[in-house]
Amino acid sequence: MTFDFTVHPGFNFVKSFAEKLNIPVYNDSLNIPASLGKGFIRFKSIEPDIRFALHHYTLKQELHLKRRAGTENHDLVSIVFNSNEIPTDSTPDRQTAIQFLKNNGSSVQIASSALSTETRFPPDMEVNFAAIGMQRATLAALLNLDKTHGPLETILHGKDLFFYHEKMHPEMQRTLKQLSGIDEQDQLNALYYKIKIHELIYLLFDKLLARSSEKQHPVNKADIDTLAAIRTAILSDLSQPPVLPALAKMAGMSETKMKQLFKQTYGDSIYNYYQAERMREAGFLLKHAGYSVSEAGYHLGFANLSHFSRLFEKHYGITPKKYTATGPAATG
């Protein structure tokens, strides 16, 4: 199933999606029919210029979302929170879903609506993401910052297109789950939505504020696709450290430009990003794949298991042995 759409002021995802599939909409909310899967999509107008769409569903077929570049207004900011999870039951497409999650993980993307993006969600995978759209001026007034630099200067006041990628932190995931669980019959649900959406915006920009104040470079759709390909190449074999000359050749970029744009977009150097993903993969192997600590360490290229354990504990705040016994909840 493919759904093409263009974001613009006043755009309502629920109504557009419902029209394509001929699904009834009640109070800006639709329920996925059993023939397609299960779940819901909700749309909320929070304050005059903040629009919010919440997606929580599992579909029987692949969903291909294609957001076309808006041409009328480059001042619309799009923020997408993806909170992906490993399917707990055994389905024919479970391995496809797991591979998708390993490659995509949970993340936040903040971009100009004038940039086109697309995402493919495999069938039988729980989709849980939220999208916030607002004008730059509205966002600037909400953040109320005296000074801006780095990503914030570009997002709020820059003339160039922008695209940033941030990890989904546990606080964001908890807030998204709270949004998914809001009782629509609660008389104060509008206030609760507003509080939690503001909380998501706060949590995201608190992270972006901590980024470097270095000069930001303009990006285009080709750059974003190239950076995504670099990221995929890094993730393809986490037992080997990235080789920068080879990545730059693959990307058709100079090493300097590649390193600058990667750090600007993903918030860290290529090597540090690789190490963080290496630890995320270690957690995945221990929790979901049944690996022992030594098997996980050797699989990820560690000849010294003590070194592996030290890096793992630095990343998770818990040793791999304890993580295996108790799971990630112990790190919260």
Image: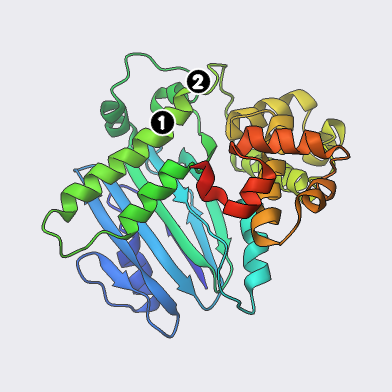
Q: Nearer the viewer, residue 26 or 313?
A: 313
Q: Say few, some or many: other residues with alpha carbon within 10 Å of mark 2 (under 14 / 14 to 19 / 20 or more).
A: some
User: At x 60% / y 28%, what residue is drawn?
Assistant: 264
Going by the numbered disc 2, the residue's amino acid type is: Gly
User: At x 32% / y 39%, what residue is drawn?
Assistant: 199
Circle 1 is placed at which residue position?
A: 205
Label 1 secondary element: helix
Q: Nearer the viewer, residue 31 or 19?
A: 31
User: Is the C-beta separation of discs 1 and 2 under 8 Å?
Assistant: no
Depicted 281 relative to depicted 206: above or below:
below
CA gap, disc 1 and disc 2: 12 Å
Q: Earlier in the sequence, mark 1 or mark 2?
A: 2
Which of pointers 1 and 2 indicates the residue nearer the eye?
1
Q: Say few, some or many: other residues with alpha carbon within 10 Å of mark 1 (under 14 / 14 to 19 / 20 or more).
A: some
User: At x 46% / y 30%, what residue is drawn?
Assistant: 207
| Residue 20 in the image, given as x and y percentages of width and height | 39, 73
Q: Seen in the image, is 286 located left or right of residue 19? A: right
Circle 2 is placed at which residue position?
A: 150
Q: Quadrant of residue 79?
A: top left
| Residue 243 in the image, given as x and y percentages of width and height | 85, 34
